[in-house]
Image (tube, rainbow, N blue to C red):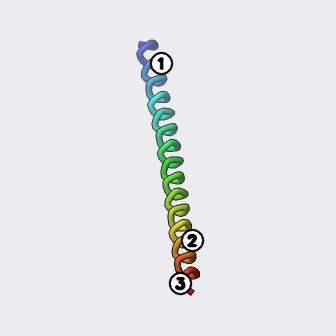
Amino acid sequence: MDFYFYLTIIIGFSLIYYGYVKKKDNELKIKELDLEEKKLELEMKKLDHEKKTSIL
C-alpha cells in the first residue's frame, strides 16, 4: 500500500512539474513571436519612411 501511495505522489508531482515547464516554454515562445512581430512592424515603418523621403 505504501509503495503505490508514494508512486502516485511522485507521478503527480512529475506531471505538475512537466505542465509547469511546458507552460513556461509556451509563454517564452509567445514572447519571442511578439518580439518578432514588433521587429517586422518597425522594419515596415522604416521602409515606408524611406519611401516617403525618397519621393520628396
Viewport quadrant of the C terminus: bottom right
Q: Residue at x 49, y 29 (%)?
A: 13
**Residue 19 place in picture, x, y as percent:** 46, 37
Asked if residue 21 is positioned above or below residue 7 in the image, the reply reads below
> Which mark identifies residue 6?
1
Element type at mark 1: helix
Element type at mark 2: helix
Q: Earlier in the sequence, mark 2 or mark 1?
A: 1
* Crowd tier of the residue under label 2, counting other residues whose Cα lies within 10 Å: few below 14, some 14–19, many 20 or above: few
**Residue 16 place in picture, x, y as percent:** 47, 34
Q: CA distance from mark 3 to mark 2?
A: 14 Å
* Crowd tier of the residue under label 1, counting other residues whose Cα lies within 10 Å: few below 14, some 14–19, many 20 or above: few
Task: Kindly identify the amino acid type of the residue bearing the numbered disc 1.
Answer: Tyr
Task: Kindly identify the amino acid type of the residue bearing the numbered disc 3.
Answer: Ile
Q: Which residue is mark 2?
A: 46
- Mark 2 against mark 1, which lies toward the viewer? 2
Q: CA distance from mark 2 to mark 1?
A: 60 Å
The answer to whether residue 8 is left or right of residue 54 is: left
Question: Marks 1 and 3: in contact by CB < 8 Å?
Answer: no
Viewer-closest of 49 and 25: 49
Viewer-closest of 6 and 50: 50
Viewport quadrant of the N terminus: top left
Element type at mark 3: helix
Q: CA distance from mark 3 to mark 1?
A: 74 Å
Q: Residue at x 42, y 22 (%)?
A: 8
Q: Residue at x 51, y 37 (%)?
A: 21
Q: Earlier in the sequence, mark 3 or mark 1?
A: 1
**Residue 7 place in picture, x, y as percent:** 44, 18
Task: Kindly identify the amino acid type of the residue bearing the numbered disc 2.
Answer: Lys
Q: Which residue is mark 3?
A: 55
Q: Residue at x 47, y 24 (%)?
A: 9
